[in-house]
Image (spheres, rainbow, N blue to C red):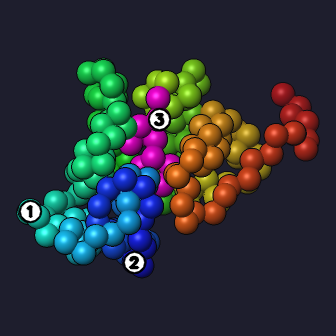
């Protein structure tokens, strides 16, 4: 699917949503602008690996490499973290996104991922503490299909994940083409425990 983008980076991303081993150039439009013919860019997924081909340099490979490049080109380095510790946390979550989220679709893996993420987010607004980062954006895109399939009860079970996810999906420019996931604010049943 070819989509012109709408923020502050020249070029365009051409990506094949859903056929890149579950990994997408999700959130790329958050840092991009209207296409210019002299700087066309494409994201291809040969054999499941993302490749960014530019007219101005070598191909870049891998979701986090491409996303980091786009953030830097858009001059939005704050999305990579503002302190050394924040940058390390962002890098950890980007690695987690690629190694743990992409391609894991069995129920047990998903349950473990949601349980661990729920515990981690217990006292945090964003993955890297108090600021939206690339980690939040790519994790949001990686988890969207999983969260979309959760029941109301499962969303309540993973309350911190639900809170974080709902916050990210309403952040301006993030959701793009993805459906809005509804989270209940009032409990419809009582918990006997």
Q: Earlier in the sequence, mark 2 or mark 1?
A: 2
Residue at the (52%, 52%) spot, across then down:
173
Residue position for label 3: 132
Determine which residue is flagged by label 1: 57
Secondary structure beneath label 3: loop
Magenta highlight on residue 80: no
Query: Helix, strand or loop at disc 2?
Result: strand
State how far apart marks 3 and 1 are (Cα): 29 Å
Residue found at x 89% / y 32%:
192
Q: Which residues are magenta?
A: 131-141
Instruction: Decide: is 118 above or below 168.
Output: above
The answer to which quarter of the image holds residue 191 is top right
Compare residues 181 and 98 and report the one nearer the observer: 181
Q: Residue furthest left?
A: 58
Percent position of residue 175, x then y: 56, 56
* Magenta region, main secondary structure: helix
Residue tagged by mark 2? 2
Q: Are marks 2 and 1 in contact (CB under 8 Å)?
A: no
Whether residue 100 is visible here, answered yes or no, is no
Image position of 88 (left or right of 57) = right
Q: Quick one: label 3, few (<14), some, or many (20+) residues within 10 Å?
A: some
Nearest to the observer: residue 4 or residue 24: 4
The x and y percentages for residue 107 are: 55, 55
Q: How many marks?
A: 3
In this picture, residue 188 sits left or right of residue 183: right
Query: In the image, residue 172 lies at what x, y percent?
Result: 56, 47
Q: Earlier in the sequence, mark 3 or mark 1?
A: 1
The image quarter in which residue 6 lies: bottom left
Front: mark 3 or 1 = 1
Q: Residue at x 40, y 41 (%)?
A: 135
């Amino acid at each position: 699917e070819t989509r012109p983008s709408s923020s502050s980076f020249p070029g365009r991303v051409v990506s094949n949503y859903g056929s890149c081993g579950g990994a997408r150039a999700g959130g790329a439009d958050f840092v991009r602008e209207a296409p210019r013919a002299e700087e066309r860019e494409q994201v291809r997924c040969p054999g499941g690996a993302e490749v960014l081909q530019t007219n101005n340099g070598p191909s870049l490979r891998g979701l986090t490499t491409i996303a980091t490049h786009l953030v830097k080109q858009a001059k939005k380095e704050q999305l990579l973290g503002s302190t050394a510790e924040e940058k390390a946390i962002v890098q950890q979550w980007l690695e987690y996104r690629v190694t743990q989220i992409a391609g894991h679709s069995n129920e047990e893996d998903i349950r473990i991922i949601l349980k661990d993420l729920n515990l981690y987010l217990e006292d945090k607004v964003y993955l890297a503490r108090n600021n939206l980062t690339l980690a939040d954006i790519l994790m949001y895109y990686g988890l969207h299909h999983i969260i979309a399939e959760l029941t109301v009860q499962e969303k309540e079970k993973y309350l911190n994940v639900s809170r974080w996810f709902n916050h990210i999906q309403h952040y301006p420019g993030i959701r793009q083409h993805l459906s809005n996931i509804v989270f209940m604010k009032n409990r419809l049943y009582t918990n006997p425990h």
